[in-house]
Amino acid sequence: MQVGACRGAAPRRSCDHAPMTAFHTLPLKPALLASLETLGYATMTPVQEQSLPPMLEGRDVIAQAQTGSGKTAAFGLSLLQSLDADAIRLQVLVLCPTRELADQVSKAIRKLAANIPNVKLLTLCGGMPLGPQLASLTHDPHIVVGTPGRVQEHLKRGSLHGGGIKVLVLDEADRMLDMGFTEAIDDIIGRIAKHHQTLLFSATYPDEIRAVSQRVQKNPAVVTVEAPTEEQPAIEQQFIEVEQASKPDALAQLLAGERGQHALVFCNMRREVDAVAQELDRRGFSALALHGDMDQRDRDEVLVRFANRSCAVLVATDVAARGLDIVALPLVICYDIAHDPDTHTHRIGRTGRAGESGLAITLCTPRERPKAGNIEELLGTPLAWRPLKLSPPRGKTLNLAPMKTLVIDAGRQDKLRPGDILGALTGDAGLQASDIGKIDVFATRAYVAISRALANKALERLRAGKIKGRNFRVRPLA
Ligand code: AMP
């Protein structure tokens, strides 16, 4: 099963199999279609696809839309469609939280209006001198884009006339509320034509936004589109049914493959974490345990070694794995199935990061089947069960990590920097930079990963020579 690549109501553009709708299927003015062609927008983004039909019908719309979703073009097209350029009066008011956004929105609307003759748009923001704004308001513009405080001021002064407004847009409404514009917005609404269409765009839907919508909108069409999922990588999930007693063999077999070079194994309990790590170690894997009973220094050391590839398999509890910040783990194995589906989702999210595909395998005893059922329910798709034929143990598997860690008993307090360690190894010790991996410098210690085959040589040389002109104690981490 693939998770993340394209799920649920994900935006259509990220799903290859979903058709994208062309703009010309909408009843748009030819002038707008011409602008879209010039801009190179052929098909609608999900927000546009869902919000344009009700907007063009004249309905109020509340849309959850982030920057980058194409929201500006969505309301821009709709407001230009209903605009009467021959009528010289203010017809559209777009309120934005900041001047930067107002400038951006103005620019986008101007581009869309490029083929409609004589459209007059004005940007009115706070922080700008009032004089020039007043001068440009001697004739009413068709469209005003601005920040609430300044627009309110012009309406109060009578330099702006709201009686003919047909469309009010609240862009990034959540930010406007955060910035304390609620009162100004309410006051503005009290000063413009009673009957108008209200289009509300917001990245989030807190209760305050719902309250504003209830106050200022009539039976709005609600549009929600998930945030773009392009960055979510594909995760393949597999489920394997095994007896409890066979779990160590199953785990060792799964880790013996290529992906086992960097894998995270989850157990439900601390004592199981230790037992599984020891069993893997006994079988020849570079495996370490990570759980909440360990002191900070040991935890740091384990995390450093897993991240610098000198530990191939990390066995952890859910809580301990939270501090783990490693991109693109190729394999996650749930040795025990998680007690609840949300924990399971967090676990499998550890693989397939940063655009790399990942594999998540869950071992499940017949008794644990009901938990698998809960996960299936959450996912809404059948789980992919696969058989695992256990082969007889082949003695020690020897699945060693590609690197080995040396620890230097000096750190930031000794003014030691990664470059000093690199310099000592590539200079006197004669190693190539490509043999040296991650270098982590802590307050009083530093860790350096070396290609496993060269680790002893590096250790000897570092002990014989100096780092930054000084002799520090250096030792390998077993
Ligand atoms: P916005 O979410 O309004 O900030 O728009 C994000 C970006 O998407 C802008 O640079 C638009 O020019 C662009 N854009 C908007 N609609 C489309 C579309 N249908 N096709 C391609 N690009 C678009």
Image: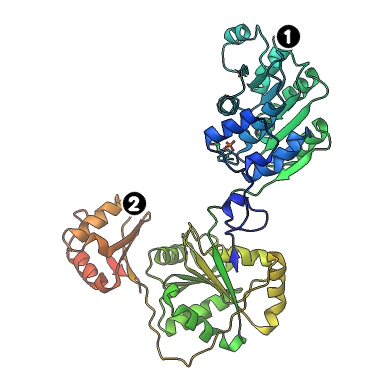
**x%, y% of residue 203?**
65, 40
**x%, y% of residue 43?**
60, 43
Circle 1 residues within 10 Å: few <14, some 14–19, many ≥20: few
* Secondary structure of the residue carrying numbered label 1: loop
Q: Which residue is mark 1?
A: 158
**x%, y% of residue 227?**
61, 48
Q: Nearer the viewer, residue 299 or 113?
A: 113
At horizontal 82% and vertical 32% (from top left) the residue drawn is 215
Which is nearer the N-term, disc 2 or disc 1? 1
Q: Nearer the viewer, residue 236 or 408?
A: 236
Image check: 445 left or right of 90?
left
Is disc 1's CB within 8 Å of ligand 1? no
Amino acid carrying label 1: it is Gly
Image check: 443 left or right of 4?
left
Gap between marks 2 and 1 measured at Cα: 65 Å
**x%, y% of residue 123?**
60, 19
Amino acid carrying label 2: it is Arg
At horizontal 57% and vertical 30% (from top left) the residue drawn is 35
Q: Quadrant of ligand 1?
A: top right
Q: Please, is residue 113 above or below residue 295 in the view?
A: above
Is disc 2's CB within 8 Å of ligand 1? no
Q: Are marks 2 and 1 in contact (CB under 8 Å)?
A: no
Q: Which residue is mark 2?
A: 412
